[in-house]
Amino acid sequence: MERLPCQNNLQQLGVALHNHHAEAGRFPPGRGTPTPAIFSAHAYLLPYLERDNLRGLIDYAAPPTTFTVPPATIYSGTRNYAAATSTIRTFVCPADSVNGRVPNSPYAGTNYAANAGSGANTGSLTNADGVFFLGSRMRLDEISDSTLHTAAFSERLMGGGGPGPGDLRRAILEIPGSGDTTAATCQPSNGS
């Protein structure tokens, strides 16, 4: 029963991507640059999902949330707090029990991850081989396998939003630059 709404959300994201491309001549970045303006593709798709009101709350020159870059640089996301805590139904699969809220956090989240690629290049967001990576500006004609054979977004459970292992089904594992993302390298003991 809940599969249909999730499929509909993915379809809406696909339509929004194509509308963004038609207007801008490219897809939105998977993660904006330079730091601290590291907005996701989702933030750039808001006008194409009829969420102009929420888009109007975003200051793309300010950090999307408060975060720290080691050793001690703190970026304040105060200017974007209202937008970052607003749940967007199109970004949420009703089958996920956290209902659009990042657990242990005031922030809203998404069940639809933008595809940065295969994990080759040591899994780095820089120069990844997917559609959405750090500072990406991909055009349709740059997708060598065509859009029929390329995933733009995939469904996932919302992450835990806090320290500790929590529910491993909700974790995104960062593994060291060990090559292929095989079953063996993706064991929780091999990464953080």
Image (cartoon, helix red, strand yellow):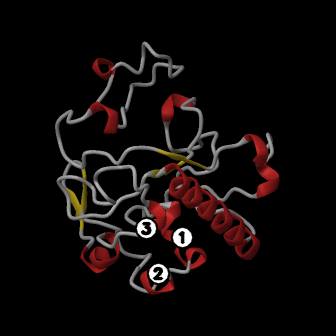
Question: Which one is in front, 114 or 192?
Answer: 114
Q: CA distance from mark 3 to mark 1?
A: 16 Å
| Dot 2 or dot 3, earlier in sequence | 2
| Dot 3 or dot 1, earlier in sequence | 1
User: Where residue 176 sits in the image (x, y, percent)?
Assistant: 39, 25
- Tell me, for residue 89, which label it has, or none: 3
Q: Residue at x 40, y 80 (%)?
A: 59
Q: How many marks?
A: 3
The secondary element bearing badge 3 is classed as helix
Of the residues shown, which amino acid type is indicated by label 1? Tyr
Q: Which residue is mark 1?
A: 44
User: Where residue 167 sits in the image (x, y, percent)?
Assistant: 24, 35
Question: Which one is in front, 74 or 43?
Answer: 43
Q: Residue at x 33, y 70 (%)?
A: 84
Question: Compared with residue 126, is residue 40 higher up or lower down, i.e. above or below?
Answer: below
Q: Which residue is mark 2?
A: 55
Q: Residue at x 32, y 39 (%)?
A: 170
Q: CA distance from mark 1 to mark 2?
A: 8 Å
Quarter of the image where one finds residue 188: top left
